[in-house]
Image (spheres, rainbow, N blue to C red):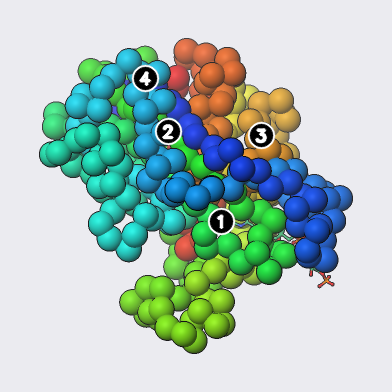
Amino acid sequence: MPDPIGLRIAGSGHFLPERVYDNAHFESYLDTSDAWIRERTGIRTRHIAGEGESTATMAVAAARAALEDAKLKPTDLDLIIVATITPEHVFPSTACCVARQLGLTSTPAFDLAATCSGFIYATVTAAHLTRGKTYRTILVIGAETMSRITDYQDRSSCILFGDGAGAVVLNALPDATGPALLHHRIHADGHGHESLWVPAGGSCLPASQMTVNERLHYVKMQGREVFKQAVSTLRQVVEGTLSEAGVTSDDVALLISHQSNIRIMEAARAKLGIPLEKMYVNIDRIGNTSAASIPIALDEARRGGHVRGGDLVMFVAFGAGFTWGSMLWRM
Ligand code: ACO
């Protein structure tokens, strides 16, 4: 049994933009159908940021809700981590924008980019930082404005993505006998990077007329390849986490997976033998919100009464990079 980290989720919150694209929106201008999208992805609607909304504004709204839930003030925070691949700017970090909007002037804040696994990477990082005495109360946010990097002419990817943000306030505990991060695994394999990426806008291919003309600032995805990798990897990482933690899938009260595609989630769940009713699903309403997906689902699950004290909750994600990871919590 690995060394658990005594930690509780003191509060959670999420934000979704008001504007919604349903499948009829895509039917109106692309060669696609509501039936195809629902059957192949499980998605019916996704929220899309409006004018004046961006990754930082949504992150702040989620953060305020999480702080309110935790009955804490921004000044109670020792650290802020924002997981995102759609930052406010190239720099400064979205986390600095969030800290500023929360009225903070010296709290450390940084971004972490691990695509759809970003929230798991950020939470694991935060958990380990609580092992020293310096960072006891940490705000972890997953926030994405995927609509700003989505090519709405590419029918195989534009139907998937949505915008939103989710946040948790983590509170270090003196021991791991109660709520705790029991075990986790995080991994990366950069060989998959061209299967799912945004080719331009970084140092390797900076913005130019050519990159704009060629639509290289948008997500490019080899859907089938990502699908295959995701299903086998999600299963392996969950099985590894369970066996290393000395528990079985029967002990898991709730599976909160990155909401990537219902068929990926379903295939992984079935192979793991976890009953359907133990998997939290909101992809039908929210679509794939990358790093925001797990904290939005977690907040909905907590507020909906699906998470009780003492429950074992398994989190799992797979995303571009490739990156993947899992966390087993006792709530
Ligand atoms: N409407 C109608 N037909 C479509 C659409 C559409 N929106 N999109 C693709 N098709 C067509 C294709 O052109 C293809 O036609 P063809 O057989 O004539 O060539 C056919 O449907 C089947 O295409 P596939 O790509 O095999 O379809 P698939 O069943 O794999 O579904 C999808 C595509 C939904 C993209 C799926 O592959 C998938 O979900 N992949 C993983 C996505 C994902 O999880 N990404 C990672 C998370 S995001 C992140 O990390 C940032």
Which residue is disc 4 drawn over? 68
Q: Which mark lies nearer to you, 1 or 3? A: 1
Identify the disc placed on residue 281.
Answer: 3
Which residue is disc 1 drawn over? 147
Q: Which mark lies nearer to you, 3 or 4? A: 4
User: How far apart are labels 3 and 4 at the CA level?
Assistant: 25 Å
Amino acid type of the residue that numbered disc 1 sits on in the rendered structure:
Ser
Is residue 263 positioned above or below 299 on the image? below
Identify the element where label 3 is drawn: loop
First of labels 1, 3 by sequence position = 1
**Residue 238 placement (x, y as % from top left):** 55, 41
Q: Residue at x 19, y 27 (%)?
A: 75
User: How far apart are labels 3 and 2 at the CA level?
Assistant: 20 Å
User: How far apart are labels 4 and 1 at the CA level?
Assistant: 28 Å
Identify the element where label 2 is drawn: helix
Amino acid type of the residue that numbered disc 4 sits on in the rendered structure:
Glu
User: How far apart are labels 4 and 2 at the CA level?
Assistant: 10 Å
Amino acid type of the residue that numbered disc 2 sits on in the rendered structure:
Ala
Identify the element where label 1 is drawn: helix
Q: Is mark 4 within 8 Å of ligand 1?
A: no
First of labels 4, 1 by sequence position = 4
**Residue 71 placement (x, y as % from top left):** 32, 15
Residue 227 in the figure: left or right of residue 76: right
The answer to the question of whether label 4 and label 2 lie on touching residues, with beta carbons closer than 8 A, is no
Q: Residue at x 71, y 25 (%)?
A: 277
Q: Which mark lies nearer to you, 3 or 2? A: 2
Q: Residue at x 50, y 50 (%)?
A: 51
Identify the element where label 4 is drawn: helix
Which residue is disc 2 drawn over? 62
At label 3, counting other C-alpha atoms closer than 10 Å, the crowd grade (few under 14, some 14-19, many 20 or more) is many
